[in-house]
Image (cartoon, grey):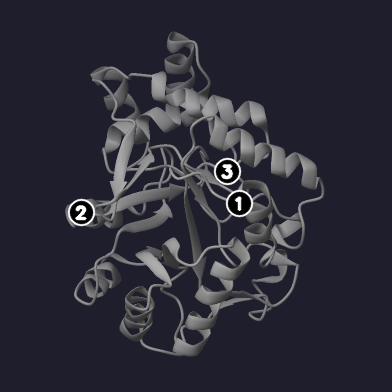
């Protein structure tokens, strides 16, 4: 089965089906500057030169440093490059490991004034008048009803600050509610070979005509921990022989499976390695057989 290598966001933005998640180009714990700025700038430019046309970031990455880095590396942006960013998450300190006992480390705010400020400042940091794709970073904020948060993004679109609206880390019910207010171009959530708890969100996304962008797409362990492309033995026993048969890496098989899972899926793998970047893009050239797809489908239940 031939893979489609592009998808259209919001009816007018065509992007490659393997994007780049820039999140890891920050300091330890996603806090502060990436320690090797020259390397980060070179990697971002290499990604675009290699054909990546969707760069994913957020104001919470750094905070703010990731957006500034992307501007320094890529501005003025090539016409085919889409920059997606997010707003609504807040960081209260650098130690993510303290989240369990200190709720002030990370949180979510949905107040209209805050979201409007966040979008405008993201546009300023990115050096654009209008953000191509702006995500509400989560459905967790409780200070304002979720529907009001979506309505704020709809207003920002009417004002020309953002072009298309996305949702990150929401429930299928929240997605349906958002769609009753405004068109949703993309949804991002955690979904990969080994972790398919967001399968219902994926189906809801695709059924409504939106693009689904899974984060940590090559990780073979549950969300909330660092990416691990080795995974448990049961997963390796399935993926490793398939990778060997195609003479590619296991991450390439994981990405090829996602590309085959739905033509509306756009994985956004994150890496700081040029070699891994090229390896990820090599997944375009991997065509899995029906038997291989069935074997990978059986790795984890979709629930």
Q: In which quadrant of the rendered image does the N terminus lie?
A: top left
Left or right of 105 on screen, residue 84: left
Which residue is depicted at the point 43% across and 32% down?
Answer: 255
Relative image position of residue 256 (x, y in whole percent): 39, 28
Q: Dot 3, how many residues are within 10 Å of its Cα: few (below 14), some (14-19), or many (20+)?
A: many
**Residue at the extreme right:** 35
Sequence-wise, the earlier of marks 3 and 2 is 2
What element does badge 3 sit on?
Answer: loop
According to the image, label 1 marks what residue? 75
According to the image, label 3 marks what residue? 270
Dot in front, 3 or 1 = 1
Image marks 3 and 2: residues in contact by CB distance under 8 Å: no
Dot in front, 1 or 2 = 1
Left or right of 100 on screen, residue 132: left
Q: Is residue 127 above or below residue 43?
A: below
Left or right of 173 on screen, residue 283: right
State the mark number for residue 209: 2
Relative image position of residue 296 (x, y in whole percent): 35, 29
Which residue is depicted at the point 36% across and 87% down?
Answer: 145
Question: How far apart are the alpha carbons under marks 1 and 2?
Answer: 30 Å
**Image mark count:** 3
Which residue is depicted at the point 62% across and 66% down?
Answer: 125
What element does badge 1 sit on?
Answer: loop
Relative image position of residue 37 (x, y in whole percent): 78, 47
Question: Where, by quadrant of the figure, is residue 63 drawn?
Answer: bottom right
């Amino acid at each position: 089965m031939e893979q489609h290598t592009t998808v259209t966001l919001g009816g007018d933005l065509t992007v490659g089906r393997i994007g780049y998640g820039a999140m890891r180009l920050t300091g330890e714990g996603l806090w502060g500057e990436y320690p090797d700025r020259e390397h980060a700038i070179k990697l971002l430019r290499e990604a675009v030169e290699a054909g990546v046309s969707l760069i994913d970031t957020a104001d919470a990455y750094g905070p703010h440093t990731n957006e500034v880095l992307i501007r320094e590396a890529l501005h003025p942006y090539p016409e085919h490059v889409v920059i997606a960013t997010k707003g609504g998450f807040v960081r209260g300190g650098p130690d993510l490991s303290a989240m369990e006992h200190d709720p002030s480390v990370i949180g979510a705010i949905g107040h209209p004034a805050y979201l409007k400020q966040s979008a405008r400042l993201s546009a300023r940091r990115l050096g654009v008048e209008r953000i191509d794709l702006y995500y509400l970073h989560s459905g967790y904020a409780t200070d304002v009803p979720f529907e009001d948060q979506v309505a704020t993004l709809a207003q920002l679109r009417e004002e020309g600050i953002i072009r298309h609206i996305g949702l990150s880390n929401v429930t299928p019910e929240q997605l349906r509610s958002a769609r009753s207010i405004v068109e949703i171009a993309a949804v991002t959530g955690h979904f990969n070979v080994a972790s398919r708890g967001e399968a219902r969100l994926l189906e809801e996304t695709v059924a409504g005509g939106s693009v689904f962008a899974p984060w940590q797409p090559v990780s073979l362990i549950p969300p909330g921990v660092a990416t691990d492309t080795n995974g448990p033995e049961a997963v390796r026993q399935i993926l490793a022989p398939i990778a060997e048969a195609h003479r590619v890496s296991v991450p390439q098989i994981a990405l090829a499976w996602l590309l085959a899972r739905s033509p509306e899926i756009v994985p956004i793998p994150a890496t700081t390695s040029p070699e891994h970047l090229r390896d990820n893009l090599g997944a375009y050239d991997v065509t899995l057989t029906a038997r291989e797809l069935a074997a990978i489908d059986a790795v984890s239940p979709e629930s």
